Amino acid sequence: MAVAVGEPAEGLAGWRLTHRQAAVSLPIARSSQEVTRYANVMLLCAALGDELLAASLRQLYLEPLRTDADDGGPLLKALRAYFASDRNTSSAAAALGLDRRTVSRRLRAVERALARPVVELGPELELALRLDRRG
C-alpha cells in the first residue's frame, strides 16, 4: 500500500498545504514500500512535474555518461553508490564490492565527461539519477 505524507503544519491552511504535498508525493510513494515524506522527495516531485527540467537534467547529466558500449552502467552505478553513501568513496566502493581506487577512477571519468567536478554537480546530478530510476 502506498503512503505519502506532507509536512506538519498548523490550521486549515496548513492542513491544505500538507494535503497538497502528500498528493504530489503519491506517485513516488507507489514505487516504494516505505512511507514517503514530501520533504524527502520534493525536488523529485518538482522535476517530474516540469517536463523541461526533467529532459534537461537527463540531457545535461546522464546522456554524456552513456557514450560507451555499456551505456554508462559502471559510471551510473558508481554515482548512485557514491550519493547513497553520503558522498563517501570508500563506502561506495564497499557497497559495490569494488576497490576504492576503482570508484575514484569512475568518478573522475564522470567529471571528465561532464567537464565539472561531481561535488559542484551534486544536487542536480543526484536528481537526474533519481529521475532516471523512475523513467
Image (cartoon, helix red, strand yellow):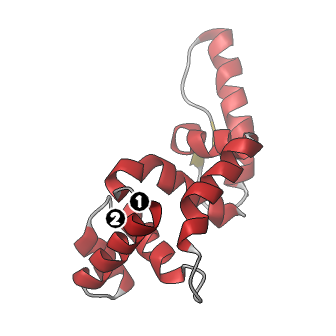
Quadrant of res 20? top right
Side of 26 relative to 5 (left or right): right
Residue 107 seen in the figure: yes
Secondary structure of the residue carrying tag 2 is loop
Q: Which residue is depicted at the point 57% across and 88% down?
A: 70
Cα separation between marks 1 and 2: 23 Å
Q: Residues within 10 Å of mark 1 (few under 14, many from 20)?
A: few
Dot 1 and dot 2 residues touching (CB under 8 Å): no
The mark lying in front, picked from 1 and 2, is 1
In the image, residue 26 lies at what x, y percent? 73, 46
Quadrant of the image for the C terminus? Answer: bottom right
The first of marks 1 and 2 along the sequence is 2
| Figure disc tally | 2
Secondary structure of the residue carrying tag 1 is loop
Q: Which residue is depicted at the point 49% across and 55% down?
A: 125
Q: Residues within 10 Å of mark 2 (few under 14, many from 20)?
A: some
Give me the disc on residue 85: 2
Which residue is label 1 attached to?
Answer: 115
In the image, residue 29 lies at what x, y percent? 68, 52
- The kind of residue tagged 1 is Ala
Q: Which residue is depicted at the point 34% across and 88% down?
A: 97
